[in-house]
Image (cartoon, rainbow, N blue to C red):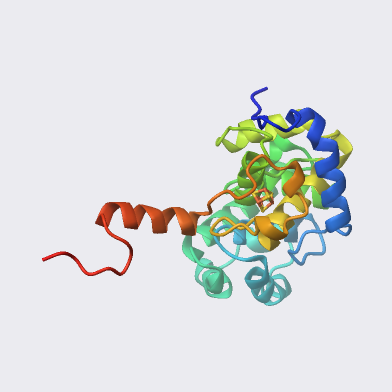
């Protein structure tokens, strides 16, 4: 297991307990923000959430789920109608294709039900390990580590891993975090990424995890881009070029 211990901090396996405890205190209640009533709705909502906020997905799903209730409904839907219903979530043509193809696969191979195991879930169109783990954790109460952009970034910033490959990050976290906590730990890292440890400008100065984090004070994307622009232009941002 490749980890990235900070020079003055204990290794990841010794910090993971305090990190997890701090996250629990910060975010005691963790549920997926995607509104759903069953595994099929969560599957569809999770496909829609790619490159889109959960809040926006929640604005389209009430009408969508009122119109299409079963896997067969999605399998036999008019693709144009489906596209129009999900258009506000972006990339709607691809998402519509995946959702309808998922409906077909569920009807043809799983009796119209969403399967409750990783191996079957990842065979569905548009469903990778990330989506599969969301569904396992939130619809089947089966622990799963979901590695989205927040979980990947925070795992690296917190020195839990150096990997950038989501599957490798998932495997590292599976070793570090007790199995029963996999789902909630993922949710909490996502919340911390959304509220404090932003990609563009992390709020290290007010981060309750700072004492456990080897990258406190890390430059976010916004600061890195600013520095890069300055370097490329060879002069401070906004300064007039020399004539
Ligand atoms: S100290 Fe900064 S880099 Fe570390 S987890 Fe907090 S916000 Fe993120």
In the figure, 17 relative to 91: above or below?
Answer: above
Figure quadrant of residue 201: bottom right
Q: Quadrant of the N terminus?
A: top right
Q: Quadrant of the C terminus?
A: bottom left
Residue drawn at (63%, 43%) of the image = 215
Q: Could you tell whether 226 is left or right of 132 in the image?
A: left
In the figure, 53 relative to 186: above or below?
Answer: below
From where the camera sits, is residue 27 visible?
no
In the figure, 166 relative to 76: above or below?
Answer: above
Q: Position of residue 120 (x, y in %)?
A: 70, 37
Figure quadrant of residue 175: top right
Residue drawn at (33%, 57%) of the image = 229
In this rendered view, identify the residue nearer to me: 228 or 200: 228
Q: Could you tell whether 35 is left or right of 92 in the image?
A: right
Residue drawn at (75%, 42%) of the image = 212
In this rendered view, identify the residue nearer to me: 155 or 144: 155
Q: Position of residue 78 (x, y in %)?
A: 55, 68
Q: Could you tell whether 88 is left or right of 112 in the image?
A: left
The number of callouts visible is 0
Residue drawn at (70%, 62%) of the image = 195
In this rendered view, identify the residue nearer to me: 140 or 193: 193
Q: Position of residue 140 (x, y in %)?
A: 84, 47
The residue furthest top is 1
From where the camera sits, is residue 107 visible?
yes
Figure quadrant of residue 82: bottom right
In this rendered view, identify the residue nearer to me: 215 or 122: 215
Q: Could you tell whether 238 is left or right of 65 in the image?
A: left
């Amino acid at each position: 297991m490749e980890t990235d211990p900070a020079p003055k901090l204990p290794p990841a396996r010794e910090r993971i307990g305090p990190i997890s405890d701090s996250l629990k205190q910060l975010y005691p209640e963790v549920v997926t923000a995607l509104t759903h009533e069953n595994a099929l709705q969560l599957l569809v909502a999770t496909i829609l959430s790619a490159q889109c906020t959960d809040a926006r997905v929640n604005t389209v799903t009430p009408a969508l789920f009122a119109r299409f209730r079963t896997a067969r409904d999605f399998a036999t839907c008019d693709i144009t109608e489906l596209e129009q219903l999900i258009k506000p979530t972006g990339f709607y043509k691809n998402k519509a294709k995946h959702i309808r193809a998922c409906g077909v696969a569920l009807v043809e191979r799983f009796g119209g039900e969403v399967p409750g195991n990783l191996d079957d879930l990842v065979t569905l169109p548009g469903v990778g390990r990330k989506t599969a783990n969301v569904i396992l954790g939130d619809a089947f109460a089966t622990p799963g580590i979901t590695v989205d952009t927040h979980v990947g970034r925070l795992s690296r910033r917190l020195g839990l891993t150096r990997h950038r490959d989501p599957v490798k990050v998932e495997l590292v976290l599976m070793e570090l975090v007790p199995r029963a906590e996999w789902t909630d730990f993922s949710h909490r890292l996502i919340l911390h990424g959304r509220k404090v440890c932003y990609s563009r400008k992390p709020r290290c100065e007010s981060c309750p995890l700072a004492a456990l984090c080897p990258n406190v004070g890390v430059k976010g994307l916004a600061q890195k881009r600013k520095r890069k622009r300055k370097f490329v232009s060879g002069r401070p941002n906004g300064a007039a070029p020399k004539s």
